Structures are given as structure tokens and as C-alpha cells.
Amino acid sequence: MKFNEKLIELRKQKGLSQDELGNALGVSRQTISKWELGQSYPDFQRLVLLSDYFGLSLDTLVKDINVEDIRSRNLSEKQLSSIY
């Protein structure tokens, strides 16, 4: 299961809206939406907060994440940032 799918499932199991989860983590609803759509990924600090919030180990939370995909997305964002 991909991280974004896992996050959606965990959020729905707790009966939370994206806004409620965002408020609990100190991020916007839009940020949660981007994570769930796979458009971006949480930084390490937010991953730790997510694992604590859902009562999972960090390992369980991030298991099966494609690290190469995250690296390529981060590289693309850095390249876009340098252009603008």
C-alpha cells in the first residue's frame, strides 16, 4: 500500500476530515490533501507526528514507501524553485 493510500485509510478509520487532521498536526487541509493525492510527502518531523497521532511505529507508517519516487519529486520541486 502506498503512503497516500495508508494515510487516507488511517484518517478515515478515525473518522477525521482532512481539516481536523491538519489542525492536529499543525498543517493546512491543503497539505493533507496533497499528501493524500501523492503530490507531496510529509517531512520527517510530520512523519513522527503522524506516527504518534495514529499510534504506529514510524517503520509501520512508512513501510512500502517508494523512496526513489520521493527523491525524484523533491528534486523536481527544487528545480522548479530555482527557476522561480
Image: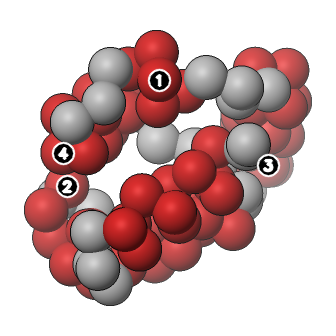
**2 vs 1, front mark:** 1
CB under 8 Å between discs 2 and 4:
yes
SS of the residue under disc 4:
helix
Three-letter code, disc 2? Leu
Q: Report the residue marked by disc 1.
A: 60
**Dot 2 surroundings within 10 Å: few (below 14), some, or many (20 or more)?**
some
Question: Looking at the rendered structure, which numbered label has been put on residue 25?
Answer: 2
In the rendered view of the protein, which quadrant contains the C terminus?
Answer: bottom right
Q: Could you tell me residue 83's position as x and y percent?
A: 80, 49
Q: Could you tell me residue 70's position as x and y percent?
A: 74, 31
Question: Looking at the rendered structure, which numbered label has been put on residue 16?
Answer: none
Disc 1 from disc 3: Cα separation: 32 Å
SS of the residue under disc 2:
helix
**Dot 3 surroundings within 10 Å: few (below 14), some, or many (20 or more)?**
few
Would residue 63 be found to the left or right of residue 8 on screen?
Answer: right
Q: Could you tell me residue 42's position as x and y percent?
A: 47, 42
Q: Report the residue marked by disc 3.
A: 80
Three-letter code, disc 4? Tyr
